[in-house]
Image (tube, rainbow, N blue to C red):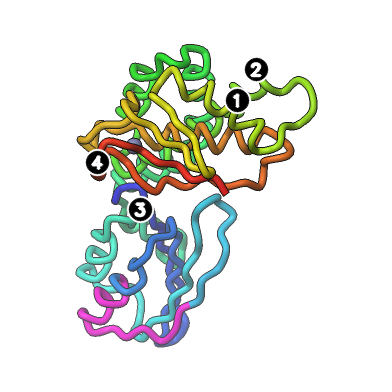
Amino acid sequence: MAANTTKLYNVSKNSVSTLTILINKKHGFLSRLYLRIESLGYSVVSHQIKPSMEEGLELIELNISGKLPLPEKLTQSIINIPECIEFVDNTGNIVGQDNHAEKSKKSRNNINSFAKQTAKEVASVYPNVAIVLDHACNNVEPSEKQPMLFQVGVFCGMVIHNDKYSLGLPMKLPQLVKHAILPTLKPIADVTYSDNQIHLTNNNCCSSNPSNSRCEFVLGLVRGLLQANKATKNKTVTKTACVSESGNVCTFVLA
Ligand SMILES: [Zn+2]
């Protein structure tokens, strides 16, 4: 929840007011915003979604009927949407701010560089990844934990590939599986492979308790190995079963 952030700017245009909202893309945000605005007697005339300069964010330009300044009650109602950071009036003055959301925006923007840095540490201690990964998980918002673990896995897989498997010609998928993917996974799980499916049991990165599972890291690891090898960089890997959901096997399908 806190991963999503919003910035609001508003400009007066006769009786139609334009609010420009900077938001981390989140399904359902617009309908919640509409509801809050309309429940306080304003109506939404139109909206337009525009790309933002900031990665992962977009701008929503919203035209609403009624004059500015908006009543305090509406300003507060908008600011209280979890994604909301600040509300700026047409003179550029910030009239409201949510510090929690501001903090999470920074963390979202930094997640890639954070994952990259973490991946270097993880690769240097691989396969003893638990402590570094747990430490990294404690440093991000709960909602960012799984995407961060996946991203760390991807970077870590690329580092491992470049260190150990990048000499010689690019490997076709069956060769990469045999010579790089399975040897990389074997220290952390019991691994079998058939029909493009990797089955992991006793996966020490996964757990039947979802909040303790680091399985996304393993998925990312396979993705990173595929991606770093020229002949397989467009291949995909999908998780179709996971101990964190049910059963005792984690299955990754290569395609
Ligand atoms: Zn799993």
- Which is more N-terminal, label 2 or label 1? 2
Q: CA distance from mark 3 to mark 4?
A: 41 Å
Answer yes or no: do the residues labelled 3 and 2 have beta carbons within 8 Å? no
Q: The residue under label 2 is which amino acid type?
A: Lys
**Residue placed most toward the observer, 220 or 2:** 220
Q: Is residue 229 above or below residue 236?
A: above
Which of the pair 125/250 is nearer the observer? 250
Name the residue carrying label 2. 164
Magenta-colored span:
33-47
The mark nearer the N terminus, 3 or 2, is 3
Q: Residue at x 53, y 32 (%)?
A: 113
Give me the C-alpha separation between circle 1 and circle 2.
8 Å
CB atoms at circles 1 and 2 under 8 Å apart? yes
Q: Disc 4 residue type?
A: Gly
Q: Label 1 belongs to which residue?
A: 180
Q: Residues within 10 Å of mark 3 (few under 14, many from 20)?
A: many
